[in-house]
Image: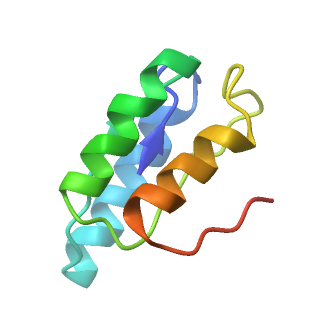
Amino acid sequence: MLVNPNYSGAQGQLREVQEAAARLGVQLVIVRANVETDFDAAFSTLVQQRATALLVNNTADFGPCDSKAWSRLAMASDRDMMEG
């Protein structure tokens, strides 16, 4: 799960997702980013942990991240991704 630590609702959302993952027996990898320089490290962690999906916390602003950052993750992980 990609979390923007500056988003005021992030902790509540993260708690809910952690509880759901535990109930479902799903391993949750949590990475935090809010500025473009954070994303490479976050995406590298997701690739290293072999994440098969990406959940992004609900936030109005994820900083200056653009579709290029999301595309880098998709290429590095050899996974299909949707941007919406």
**Looking at the picture, how far across and down is residue 11, in whole percent?**
42, 34
Q: Is residue 59 left or right of residue 35?
A: right
Quarter holding the C terminus is bottom right
In the rendered view, would you say 13 is above or below 51?
A: above
Residue 60 figure quarter? top right
Residue at 48 percent across and 52 percent down: it is: 73
Residue at 29 percent across and 62 percent down: it is: 19
**Looking at the picture, how far across and down is residue 68, in whole percent?**
68, 41
Q: How many marks?
A: 0
Of residues 77 and 58, the one nearer the viewer is: 77
Q: Is residue 54 left or right of residue 9?
A: left
The answer to whether any part of residue 6 appears in the image is no
**Looking at the picture, how far across and down is residue 66, in whole percent?**
73, 34
In the rendered view, would you say 37 is above or below 72?
A: above
Of residues 21 and 34, the one nearer the viewer is: 34
Q: Is residue 11 left or right of residue 45?
A: right
Residue at 39 percent across and 43 percent down: it is: 43
The answer to whether any part of residue 9 appears in the image is yes
Residue at 27 percent across and 83 percent down: it is: 24
Residue 35 figure quarter? top right
Of residues 23 and 65, the one nearer the viewer is: 65
Of residues 31 and 44, the one nearer the viewer is: 44
**Looking at the picture, how far across and down is residue 25, in whole percent?**
18, 80
Q: How is the image coloured?
A: rainbow
User: Outermost residue, bottom direction?
Assistant: 24
